[in-house]
Image (cartoon, grey):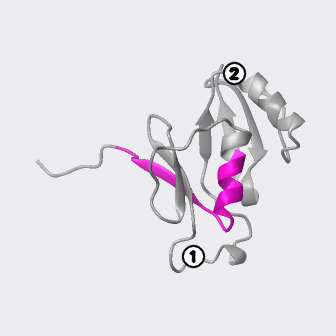
Amino acid sequence: MAATVEGPDSVALQMKDVPAAAAFFEERLGLRRAPASPPGAVVFSTSPIAFAVREPLPGVDLDDAARPGLGVALRLRTSDASALREQLVQAGTQDVSPLQDTPFGLTFSSTGPEGYRLTVHGG
């Protein structure tokens, strides 16, 4: 039998300002840092796969990107989408959409660090 991929193992967003991006995910979304991160990255304790913010990889020029992550759908799960949305609005997060009822539960989107579009769903 041929070897196959089992599924995603981790997701990392490349950022110009890793400390500011890490602070957003910790302070506004409540993520917790994993016990260890590689140099130039902050890895969070998330499941079912790891999530991180990291410095750009060699050859990536984020200053040349019209909108970081264009074409990537980053969906985050929460137990209470309504409460999390309100927290983000109160914290001044940019461009928070209204809640929508979807097959994945209540869903909203917002602009995250450095222009990445984040969609949150659940509860």
Image spot of residue 10 (x, y percent): 44, 49
Residue at far top of view: 123
Q: Which residue is drawn at 72% across and 26% down?
A: 81
Side of 26 where 2 appears, left or right: left
Q: Is mark 2 on a helix, strand or loop?
A: loop
Q: According to the image, label 2 marks what residue?
A: 80
- What is the x, y in percent for residue 102? 68, 25
Depth check: give the residue in front, 76 or 40: 40
Q: Tell me if residue 22 is in the magenta stretch.
A: yes
Image quarter of the C terminus: top right
Pick the front one: 113 or 36: 36
Q: Residue furthest left?
A: 1
Q: Residue at x 85, y 48 (%)?
A: 94
Q: With 4 as the anchor, is 53 left or right in this view?
A: right
**Residue linked to disc 1:** 60
54 or 75: which is nearer to us? Answer: 54
Residue that appears at 53% across and 65% down: 40
